[in-house]
Image (cartoon, grey):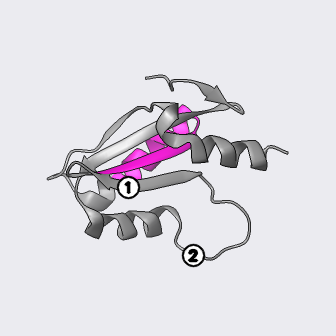
Amino acid sequence: MRGSRHYFGLMIYEIRFPGGLDDTEAVARLLCPVEEHDGPCEVPWSLAAHDGDVVLGIHADQAKAEEVADRVRAFVGEARPVTLTDADPAYYEELIEQARIESR
């Protein structure tokens, strides 16, 4: 698998699994256990519920994207399939902007 485009040395990936709004806060805490912290998150991310799925966009290298997908798989369990795919950057402009700001 390859990310769709490089942004500041990393790529935009999408992690998706069946779920809804109830799952988004739990996944947010999985990625960022301390909601109000100094500095950027380890992995820049964006999260939404869409069409019966939880959709997580991340800005990472392939190894980190696979690691995050594995963490999500462990969290949601085997009953719900988790997919990791290249993301359309048009849906994740905020991640690209965050990367631009942090690269200064």
Which residue does the numbered mark 1 point to in the structure image? Answer: 48
Q: Position of residue 16 (x, y in %)?
A: 32, 45
How much space separates mark 1 and mark 2, taking CA atoms?
A: 19 Å
Estimate the x, y position of residue 21 in percent, counting from the top left: 28, 65
- Give the residue drawn at x 40%, y 46%: 69
* 65 inside magenta stretch: yes
Q: Amino acid at mark 2?
A: Val
Residue matched to label 2: 34
For residue 16: magenta?
no
**Position of residue 92 measured from the top left corner of the image (x, y, whole percent):** 52, 41
Residue found farthest to the left? 79
Asked if marks 1 and 2 touch (Cβ < 8 Å), the reply is no
Residue in the image at 72% along x and 33% along y: 8
Helix, strand or loop at label 1? It is strand
Q: Secondary structure at mark 2?
A: loop
Span shown in magenta: 54-72
**Of the pair 88 and 13, the residue shown nearer to us:** 88
Neighbours of disc 1 within 10 Å: few (<14), some (14-19), many (20+): some
* Along the viewing direction, whichever of 77 and 23 lies nearer the viewer: 23
- In the picture, which quadrant includes the C terminus? top right
Q: Is 69 on the left-hand or right-hand side of 63?
A: left
Q: Which quadrant holds the N terminus?
A: top left
Choose top left, top right, bottom left or bottom right for residue 22: bottom left
N-terminal of the pair, mark 1 or mark 2, is 2
Relative to 9, say whether 64 is above or below.
below
Is 98 in front, or is 41? 98
Q: Name the residue at 46% across, 45% down.
A: 57
* Residue type marked 1: Ala
Across and down, in percent, residue 102 comes to: 76, 49
